[in-house]
Image (cartoon, helix red, strand yellow):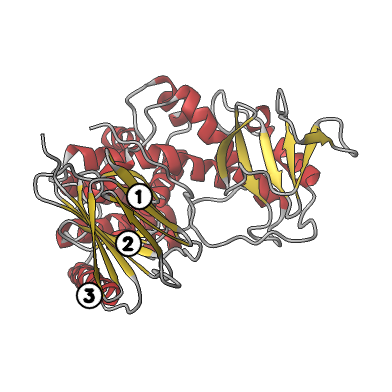
Amino acid sequence: MHVFFSIFLLFGLAAVQDTAEHVKDPILVIAELDRLAGMELWPGFDPASYPIALFDGADTWLFRHPSPPEGFRSAPNSQTAWVYEGRHPAMRWNSKAEIGGVTTATILLNIQPDRPAIEEASIIVHETFHIFQDERHPGWTANEAHRFTYPIDDAQNYLLTIIEDHALARALEAKSDKEAAAWAARGLVARRERTTVLADEHRAFETGLEMMEGTARYLAQFALGKSESTATLLDILPPDQFRWRPYATGCALAALLDRFDGGWKQRIEDTAELTLERALEDFLRKLGASPADFTADELAGFKLRAEKAIADLLVRRKSLREEFRSREGWRVILKVAPGAELLATERFDPITNALLGGKEMLHGNILILSHERGRVEMRNPRSRRGEFVGLNALTTTEGEHPVFGGIRSAVFSGFTGEPEVETEGGKVKIATDGFSLEFSSAALQRDGRHLIVLLKKTEQ
């Protein structure tokens, strides 16, 4: 299956307000980056060699770009920087984007205005390492489509992630190398027990994120002289937030490799199929490390914690479904008649949604569904990660995949007023703030404030 969709913001969707004043001197941040770049971070990687764009709350600064596009002018106080008045459209989040046809690291300095320049520089290390990965290790990635079929409500899988994370935390905290190796081995035992029953695509998803995000997170901390915080591992994420877990576990594996094996980076760089997990596993095997273990009381506590988390997930799913279905006001209900072509997911935001079990998904931000006879587009300006306010959609898929299995129905709710409706010659158009729908060979029914659009089966 070929899947095309956009991940808009990898680190969250909380709104970042532009400020009227500069929040930090971009030139100072670049100076700190150059200092960090003098360290031996990773074989062949130099974070100071990539184009970098910084938004300081007022203007967008561009450094080390081979051909600044129209709109950028030479900075008055630097011979190596260009400035764009205001926030450039590419500056969506701490990430990377095409600017002037060149992949550029993008950093928003106004996310946390009081963050020290050295920490902002470490974030640039993180983002430029992603560009390095794209060039040198294109396999270090994860197919986000597999995220939505991951067994997040599997209590045993979740229990073993808790055991693994606690074991890795103890390995990081261990005073002696022997103790650290024993707890690292215990973590890998839990991982093997867990992953042997996972589908291949779900194992690949976890590993891909560890290689992509775990290593980048590790390098940013390494540049600051820090290591992965055990608090991140011990503060276990809820089951439906598992996508963010490999950031911490990958970073922890890298930190443990640093402790045990000084040449691990070069070996991973030289060996295409070598992962963080395998590199650590190989070292522990050579060392002959025997796994440590938790007490019976600790294991019982982990089990209770896992069972409660899964129960809470099921309650939240039910609550979200009931809240959406009980909303008052206008709603648009789009249905595909039996035998008619299903709707395809053209674009959606994979961060601001919730799987409700079965074949239902609640969308909180952007959703575009297309069809040979039209399309529907939703954009929620009130979107906020973790909440479902404003304009939302509930989709039901026909196939096994909740996003790409073919959408049978979509319900849109949260309109601020009555949508404008046009019908003529079998065409239906509905439009209002943040929402547009247009289909041919469709029928419109009204039921109070419910606008029901049926895509009919066309005659062959």
Q: Which mark is drawn over residue 438? A: 1
In this view, the mark in front (1 or 2) = 1
Q: Residue furthest top?
A: 270
The residue positioned 90% from the left and 39% from the top of the image is 77
Q: Residue 307 or 80: which is nearer the viewer? A: 80
Q: Position of residue 329 (x, y in %)?
A: 35, 77
Q: Secondary structure at mark 3?
A: helix
Write down the residue under mark 2.
393
The residue positioned 34% from the left and 38% from the top of the image is 142
Q: Amino acid at mark 1?
A: Glu
The N terminus lies in quadrant? top left
Q: Residue 61 or 281: which is nearer the viewer? A: 61
| Residue 295, above or below 173 | below
Q: Residue 37 or 263: which is nearer the viewer? A: 37
From the viewer's perspective, tell me whether residue 220 is left or right of residue 439. Answer: right
Q: Residue furthest front?
A: 425
Disc 1 to disc 2: CB gap under 8 Å = no
- As measured in the structure, the alpha-carbon distance from the residue carrying label 1 to the one carrying label 2 is 17 Å
Q: Secondary structure at mark 1?
A: strand
Q: Earlier in the sequence, mark 1 or mark 3?
A: 3
Disc 1 to disc 3: CB gap under 8 Å = no
Write down the residue under mark 3.
315
- As measured in the structure, the alpha-carbon distance from the residue carrying label 1 to the one carrying label 3 is 36 Å
Q: Residues within 10 Å of mark 2 (few under 14, many from 20)?
A: many
From the viewer's perspective, tell me whether residue 14 is left or right of residue 260. Answer: right
Q: Earlier in the sequence, mark 3 or mark 2?
A: 3
Q: Position of residue 168 (x, y in %)?
A: 35, 53
The residue positioned 44% from the left and 42% from the top of the image is 213
